[in-house]
Image: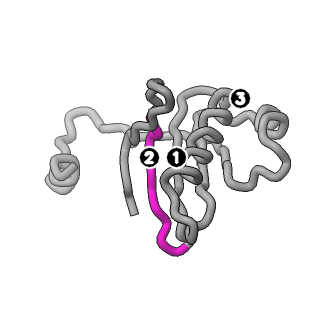
Amino acid sequence: MSVARQKRVTLEGDRFYVDLVFYNRLLRCFVLVDLKLGKLTHQDLGQMQMYVNFFDRFQGAEHEAKTIGIVLCSEKNDAMAKITLPRTASRIERGATRCTFPQRTSGAPSSPASVRLLSAR
């Protein structure tokens, strides 16, 4: 279940924004997703760890499972993740993603179905 997009977290006047916040009803926990452009850095992992800690301490209830953090970036860095995350950090996942969009053929009009889908967003 989607909870928030660009969820603000304020710590001593500093504002941070979690890109996507979900609540998984089966696992009974929050799932945080941070979207990053470029290669995974230790700052990205530290930031996600801060978000996970914040949600565990201030957002979640006692009966809920621990928060899961996911960092999606365009280029993964396994060595950085192994060194930065503790061996027991099973609640933060990282992975590389690539977004591809279909090529539009020149002169071909958009189909009415795709126009409806785009306008519904």
Residue at image point 59% right, 26% down: 38
User: Which three-letter amino acid code belongs to the residue tagged 2?
Assistant: Leu
Residue 15: horizontal and vertical position, in percent? Answer: 44, 28
Along the viewing direction, whichever of 81 and 59 lies nearer the viewer:
59
Q: Give the range drawn in magenta.
A: 17-26
Residue of label 1? 33
Q: What element carries label 3?
A: helix
> What residue type is disc 3 on?
His
Residue 84 lies in what quarter of the image?
Answer: top right
Q: For numbered disc 2, what is the local secondary structure?
A: strand
Q: Which residue is drawn at 69% across and 36% down?
A: 76
Of label 3 and label 1, which has the lower sequence position?
A: 1
Q: As displayed, is residue 9 above or below residue 66?
A: above
Q: How far apart are marks 3 and 2 (CA)?
A: 20 Å
The single residue placed furthest to the front in the displayed view is: 12
Residue at the disc numbered 2: 20
Residue type pointed to by label 1: Val
Secondary structure state at the residue bearing disc 1:
strand
Residue 93 location (% of width, % of height): 67, 49
Residue name at image x 45 percent, y 37 percent: 9
Q: Where is residue 43 in the image (x, y as percent from the top left)?
A: 66, 27
Residue beneath label 3, please?
Answer: 42
> In the image, is 39 to the left or to the right of 98?
right
- Circle nearer the N terminus (3, 2): 2
Q: In which quadrant will I find the N terminus?
A: bottom left
The disc at residue 115 is none
Q: Distance between the residues labelled 2 and 1?
A: 5 Å
Query: How many residues crowd mark 3 within 10 Å: few (<14), some (14–19), many (20+)?
Result: some
Rendering coords of residue 89 (x, y %): 76, 50
User: Looking at the image, which residue is at 17% across and 52% down?
Assistant: 120
Indicate which disc, 2 or 1, sits on the residue closer to the N terminus.
2
